[in-house]
Image: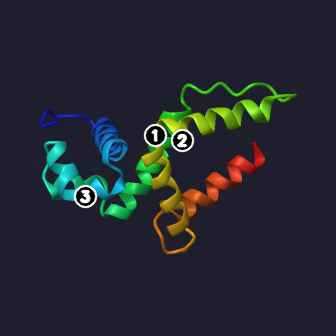
Amino acid sequence: MSERLEPEERRRRILATAMAIIDSEGHQGLSMRRLARECGMSAPGLMHYFPDLATLVVAVVDYRDQRDFAGVEIPPPGPGMTRTVLDAVIGNIIARPKAAELFAIVEAQAIDPRHPGHQYFRARAESVATD
């Protein structure tokens, strides 16, 4: 990734690379130094986008949600809707268990209001509950 990119594209590529590491090795294989190296960046360059690992993994969780549900069609309310949605969610968990594990870990850590993901998970829970 040494080419010059717009900030949003660079950020998207960083998240895609982090997600690829997690999908193949789990979250234990992810470090800021390794991610910077795999993205062709310096660690300080990566920290311009994500100041620490906790902030990065929250962004990865959001990226995972967007990636996994981009192709899911939500049926109109009615019989079978809940089952269809749950089948899609379970299918994504089965297809990418290490990403699902990261989601569960970060969600649990984000219970602490000081965690960078606290507001993200609160807003996510509220949107799921009202949809």
Q: CA distance from mark 2 to mark 1?
A: 5 Å
Task: Report the mark closest to the observer, 3 or 2.
Answer: 2
- Please identify the quadrant where the N terminus is shown: top left
Q: Residue 49 in the image: x percent, y percent?
A: 29, 52
The crowding category of the residue bearing disc 2, from other C-alpha atoms within 10 Å (few below 14, some 14 to 19, many at least 20), is some
Q: Residue at x 56, y 33 (%)?
A: 69
Task: Residue at 50% x, 48% y: name it.
Answer: 100
- State which quadrant residue 77 falls in: top right
Amino acid type of the residue that numbered disc 3 sits on in the rendered structure: Ser
Distance of label 3 from label 1 (alpha carbons): 19 Å
Q: Amino acid at mark 2?
A: Ile
Task: Give the residue at x 54% y 74%.
Answer: 112
Residue position for label 3: 31
Q: Which residue is mark 2?
A: 93
> Can you give x and y, in whole percent of width and height, for residue 15 in the image?
34, 43
Instruction: Tell me where residue 42 appears, x and y as whole percent.
Output: 13, 52
Which tag, 3 or 1, sits closer to the chain's start? Answer: 3
